Amino acid sequence: MKFRLVAIVLVLLIAAGLLAVGGDHLTLRLVGASALLAIGAAAIALPIGSLLAIILARLAIPGRWLAQGMLTLLLFQPLYLTCGAWRAAFGPQGWLQDQIGPAANPYLLDGWLGAIVLHGVAAIPWTFFFVRMQLATSAPELEEDALLNSSPASTLLNVTLRRAAPGVLIAALWIGVVAFGEMTVTSICNVRTYAEVLFTGITLGEAVEQTSLPVWPAVLITLLMTLVATSLAAQLTPAGATSMPTRLPTFPLGPVAKLVVATIAWLAVVVLFGLPIGAFVYKAGLIVDVTGGQVLRSWSAAKLAELVFASADKYSGLFQWTFALGAVSAAATLLISVSMAWFASRRRYGQTVIATIAGILFGVPGPIIALSLIWLLNRRQSPLLIHLYDRTILAPAIALVIISLPICLLLLWHIFRIDPGELDEAAQLEGFGPWRRLWRIGVMRRPAVLAATYLLAFALATSDVTASYLVTPPGVDTLSRTIFEMLHYGAEDNVASLCLINLAFSATLAVITIMLLRPAFRAAQS
């Protein structure tokens, strides 16, 4: 862990030196802007997410399992929905501005303030997830022994926080990779970062070889993101088929302390989970009347219901293309991830292979994926490639597979490592080849896990904007693409109703996926 951290710091310094020596002013400014975005988001997400993970993992507050489930559901919430919801509440023409008027202008989630806050809020559930997983896999004996010899507060500070440190580092790496590779929030908030300018140049009609940014900094930044993501992926892959501890220590709390801690934790969870729903419900049901020069605002449940049903009918074509792209890319992702994770789990160097592949795919920024596909397929001298690029959904499907494959690979790697080696050895003695062993042991024994992986890939594919937006062919439009475009003009009632439908769809996928994966996680603890 320490060696990997030192290596990352050295590469960061080398990359910064190369950019400082050979980078032009625009590139340096955009890279600095992306770094500032990552630092600001980490300053928000790391303390809040880590605190929630420690409270819900180690303190016996009322309803902590429900709170953990609510935070886990937020992992499936697309970034553009998080952005739209918080801007509907605290952005331009949002709830806060409706209540206090121009006095809200300095605090609106727009520009740099909006980009940093929205990235930070979106990263809180992921920080909770990484730190919670780190605490779940830590040996409980150290904390239990410390509780016998010191106070709960001392144990939390001196033992638990140290055990959680790797999870915090992984969360920080995740935030950095997302901040450098994502342009969803920065595009909506009108903030210029490297990914946003690269994306904007292509949407304005620049050819791949004529982008306003030089090529070599893009390659350097991509390699840097790959290194960081590979380090992250290596931390998420287990070294062996070890099981998690079946019991976790719970720290005693007095009545007053328990009330205070529970109030803080539940307030944060309710805001994170409930605000998107409340903001979209408010916007979709809002009625504005102008009478005698005065603006009168009211809210109507009837308008909310009518608008939701009208949006479902009006945008039915979006759902068809969204489901088609999601189904195709999820099927390809499942096939590739099952094969790779299974065979890697049976090889000595499988962990390195899986971590490297997942890191490379995850580390490449979305606009770079799109640019690569444009360069590969958009070739006028080849009628076949032009047909595939302009007349089929091949390009966006490939982009979505690249986006969803890393997480699915890591998930199946964990699951397949639980299998006892005796089953595979017995199948070999019976004369089964590698593909038959994959089918009998890897596939037939875990239909629920494979279904969950398919739904996870489907959810990731249907929520992507960054990689697939630039390569979607004419005549094809998806839910995420349309909502992303509409959010540039504010979270009005029509986009709010569409976001509510998308939110319900994402939550349904999340609940089903978690329920399907629960038996596998319980088996890992047995």
Image (spheres, rainbow, N blue to C red):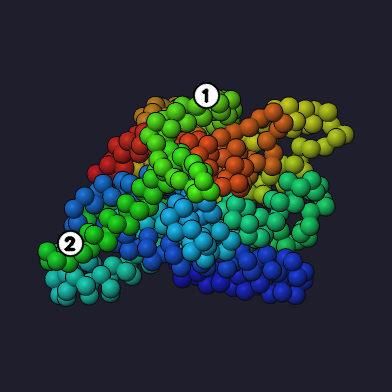
Q: Position of residue 340 (x, y in %)?
A: 52, 39
Upstream in sequence: badge 2 or badge 1? 2
Residue occupying image coordinates x 21% and y 72%: 153
Q: Which quarter of the figure has residue 264?
A: bottom left
Q: Amino acid at mark 1?
A: Asp
- Which residue is tagged 1? 313
Residue occupying image coordinates x 72% and y 65%: 27
Residue occupying image coordinates x 52% and y 51%: 93
| Horizontal side, residue 409 vs residue 190: left or right | left
Q: Amino acid at mark 2?
A: Leu
Vertical comparison of 429 with 97: above or below: above
Q: Which quarter of the figure has residue 300?
A: top left
Residue furthest right as drawn = 381
Residue furthest front as drawn = 292
Question: Mark 2 near mark 1, Cβ–Cβ under 8 Å?
Answer: no
Of 211 and 4, which appears nearest the observer? 211
Could you say whether the residue bearing mark 2 is in a helix, strand or loop? helix
Of 48 and 276, which appears nearest the observer? 276
